[in-house]
Structure formats: structure tokens, C-alpha cells
Amino acid sequence: MRNAITAKMAMLPDYLCKSLTWDQGAEMAQHAQLKIDTGLSIYFCDPRSPWQRGTDEKTNGLLKSAPS
């Protein structure tokens, strides 16, 4: 997962690569190395707090549907 995120982040403009918010999941076990590789600030949602991810997903949906 770390390698995939690092590769995708390298394709994005710098202003979109400031931070990453993630659920509590095993796929981010190498988050410390990801932070070193990409320079991202990495945040995790609190356990059993799904509403924290909702804001991220809504924002991502708005960004994806915005006209280019």
C-alpha cells in the first residue's frame, strides 16, 4: 500500500499533497515510512468514529465532480 500511495502522490501537484487522513486499518502499518517518502502529514480517525471519514469522503466527491 505504501508504494502505491507514494507513486500516486508523485503524480499530483504539490498543493494537493499536504496531508492524508486514514481510517484505523492495517493497510497503513507503514505510515511512518510513507511520511518520510512523501513528506505528507498523516492523520488517523479515532476508533469507532466513522463521521470523521465522512467529511473527507464528501470533500473528495466534490473535488472529483468539480469541472476542470
Image (cartoon, rainbow, N blue to C red):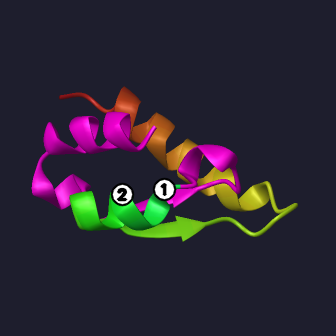
On screen, residue 20 above or below 1: below
Q: Secondary structure at mark 1?
A: loop
Nearest the camera: 18 or 68? Answer: 18
- x and y, in percent, of residue 66 in the image: 32, 33
Quadrant where the C terminus is found in the figure: top left
Q: Which residues are magenta?
A: 1-29
* Marks 1 and 2 in Cβ contact (< 8 Å): yes
Number of numbered labels in the structure image: 2
- Is 6 in the magenta? yes
Q: Amino acid at mark 1?
A: Gln
Distance of mark 1 from mark 2, alpha carbons? 6 Å
- x and y, in percent, of residue 13 in the image: 11, 48
Q: Secondary structure at mark 2?
A: helix
Residue pictured at 14% horizontal, 37% vertical = 11
Q: Which residue is mark 2?
A: 34
Q: Amino acid at mark 2?
A: Leu
Residue pictured at 53% horizontal, 69% vertical = 43
Density class for disc 1 (Cα within 10 Å; few <14, some 14-19, many ≥20) is few
Judge left or right: residue 6 versus residue 24: left
On screen, residue 32 above or below 23: below
- Is 9 in the magenta? yes
Nearest the camera: 9 or 35? Answer: 35
- x and y, in percent, of residue 7 in the image: 23, 36
- Report which quarter residue 44 is drawn in: bottom right
Residue pictured at 82% horizontal, 65% vertical = 47
- Report which quarter residue 63 is drawn in: top left
Residue pictured at 75% horizontal, 69% vertical = 46
Residue 19 visible (yes or no): no
Q: Which residue is mark 1?
A: 30
Judge left or right: residue 24 versus residue 67: right
